Amino acid sequence: MSAHKTPGHGNRPIRAALIDVSGTIHVGRDAIPGAISACRRLRSERGVDLRVLYLTNTSRMSSAELLMTLRDAGFDDDALPGLESVMTSVGATRRYLLDNELRPFCLVGDDLLTSDLRDVVETTSTSTMDPNCVLVGLAPEKLDYANVNTAYRLLLKWKEEDDAVAAAAASASGGERRPIPIVPPSPRLIAVHRSTRHRDDDGHLSLGPGAYVSLLEGAVGSGLSARVIGKPSRDFYMAALSCLGEDLDPSEVVMVGDDIVGDVIGALDAGLGRAILVRTGKYVTGDELGRGGVVPTLTVDSIVEAVDYICSNSGLK
């Protein structure tokens, strides 16, 4: 176990834990060794009121399929009560699309279109005739050349339209050209999350949706910036803190995960007191060194050691 100090934690007891799912408590259909017992420990051996919420960027399967996968892996009600204890980036994406009346050209899996996102895309599909944004998730079956190129052409068309509007506004103001905003009022490119890699069912690392998001941003150019919904978005973490309870101070919350950017840097940037990196899932050697001077509070072998730390710093035994 190797520790890394990050400024601003203080010594306040841990009152709540946010725990990543894929790569942290399971990989594919298998539980991380010791993860089931560790999750049970957080729920059953409570010496204090420790609140636990699981976070996932998973966009490859529906919420129902995710719960079934976890149940098949051995996570019973004593380890993980149900979907009410899991906050998903897909759920947050659904709310964002509905709130902003967006009609996405969808590069996400068909199972999401018939479940979690059904009310958003009831009249749309990958080939929708009237989209006003592009939505990207982890969908290997959709991220082929034809679909990605269609997304590119849509984004390019909207950029040209936005440029024309800006030029017309400049002309109407007497020739004074106003700067084109980097992010349009209604974002055109929306990412369920932008992780660049994930640990696949075969045990090897595979490309994540973030690679395709970056490709589209770079191809369209001129300041196109995706609206990221899931981790490491600060809004996603703020929503998670709200779910835990308004009486909590962010410094009393710890994040545990396998993603140095999404789980560690995202959590610390959002003001959480601690972030623990586990050497499972998408972790690769060197992640513990952090990015841009931000390092994990602690780097441990697995969720088992992370729970040991949480218990030792929260009053749990």
Image (cartoon, rainbow, N blue to C red):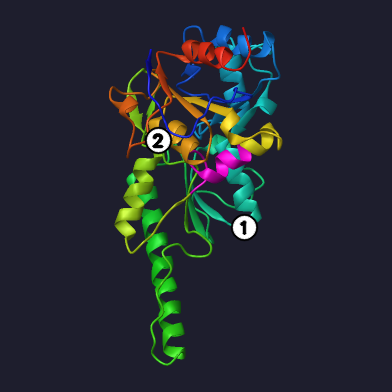
Query: Hey, which quadrant is residue 161 in on the image?
Result: bottom left
Name the residue tied to disc 2: 261
Could you say which quadrant of the image residue 225 lies in?
A: bottom left
Residue 14, given in percent of the width and then of the height, sits at 59, 23
Q: What amino acid type is highlighted by mark number 2?
A: Val
The single residue placed furthest to the left in the displayed view is 286
Say if the magenta span includes residue 140: no
Q: How many labels sit on residues? A: 2
Q: Is residue 70 above or below residue 195?
A: above
The image shows residue 146 at horizontal and vertical percentages of: 36, 49
Are the residues tagged 1 and 2 within 8 Å (C-beta)? no
Residue pictured at 39% horizontal, 31% vertical: 260
Q: Name the outermost residue toward the front.
A: 11
Evaluate whether residue 121 shows in this view.
no
Q: Amino acid at mark 1?
A: Asn
In-front residue for pair 234/54:
234
User: On the picture, is 93 further left or further right than 161?
Assistant: right
Assign a secondary structure to mark 1.
Answer: loop
Image height of 72 relative to 174, above or below:
above
Camera-nearest residue between 63 and 180: 180
Residue at (39%, 71%) from the top-left corner?
160
Cα distance between the residues tagged 1 and 2: 27 Å
Q: Quadrant of residue 3?
A: top left
- Along the polypeptide, which appears first: circle 1 or circle 2? 1
Residue 311 point in image, percent of width and height = 58, 13
The boundaries of the magenta stretch are 228-240
Q: Secondary structure at mark 2?
A: helix
Q: Answer with left or right where residue 206 lies relative to residue 268.
A: left
Please name the residue that numbered disc 1 is placed on: 100
